[in-house]
Image (cartoon, grey):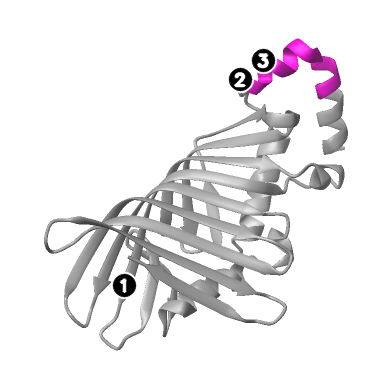
Amino acid sequence: WIAAAFVGAFGLLGVAGRKMLQSNPVEPGAWLTSRVVQQVNAILPTGRIAFRSLQVSLGENYRPQIYLEDVVLSDASGQRLAQIGRVQGDIALRGLWKGQVDVKRAAASGLILAVDRKADGAFDLGFGAASVGQSDTFVGLFEAIDDFFDRPVVAALEEIVIQNVSVIYSDGSTGQTWTGDGGDLRLVQEDDTLLISASVAVLTGRQDLETFETIFERDRDTGHATLTAIV
């Protein structure tokens, strides 16, 4: 019935109305807001999402889009994991026909990513001060992300792009900390591969800016994974 509602509203709007909806997002009814919350909470089984407002519009080829403002992700205990100013998502039309609000592509801006290398060599990944995952190796962090997305509940999600990412890297063995700003993070998921690429400008000890880039690619059929770092 969700798809039928979209199609019915789409037809009633007419060409002029659809053009207006492309440039002027509107607030939907409570049913769509509830569906979005349910879907995100299903993706984050031990977490919860909250946001100030939700709007919908039509993107290119009249694909439905959602916009979330002032998004806060929290864990099961209520501790804040991440806060993002704005998140945009393209809704998969196939899911709508099944009564599901599946996000096909997502884009966001403004995220603080913390990577902490412990004195024993283990790595800890977090958003700001909140930890969301640990691994004995740097590659293991990417593999943990791969495991997170290799689930039916996020099968429709093809791409995530996050801009304006700040990265704080702390090395417990040396006591040094590096900060990077203006970073980009991109995740592309296909049937048999996962590609994660990240780049950030880091201020070195010489007070020079250097670009650090990492590319992780995993073949899910064979399990083979490669990690490339470019400075």
The residue singled out by tag 1 in the image is: 116
Whole-angstrom CA distance, mark 1 to mark 3, is: 47 Å
Q: Foreground residue, 221 or 4?
A: 221
Report the amino acid beneath label 1: Asp
The residue singled out by tag 2 in the image is: 23
- First-in-chain label (1 vs 3): 3
Q: Helix, strand, or loop for circle 3?
A: helix
Q: Helix, strand, or loop for circle 2?
A: helix
Q: In the image, is residue 195 part of the stretch drawn in magenta?
A: no
| Residue 204 location (% of width, % of height) | 18, 62
Q: Report whether 84 appears left or right of 102.
A: left
Please tell me whether the stretch drawn in magenta is mainly helix, strand or loop: helix
As displayed, is residue 92 above or below residue 195? Answer: above
Whole-angstrom CA distance, mark 1 to mark 2, is: 42 Å
As displayed, is residue 211 above or below residue 17? Answer: below
Write the start and end of the magenta stretch as one range: 10-23
User: Would you identify the image quadrant in which residue 155 lies?
Assistant: bottom right
Residue 20 is labelled as 3
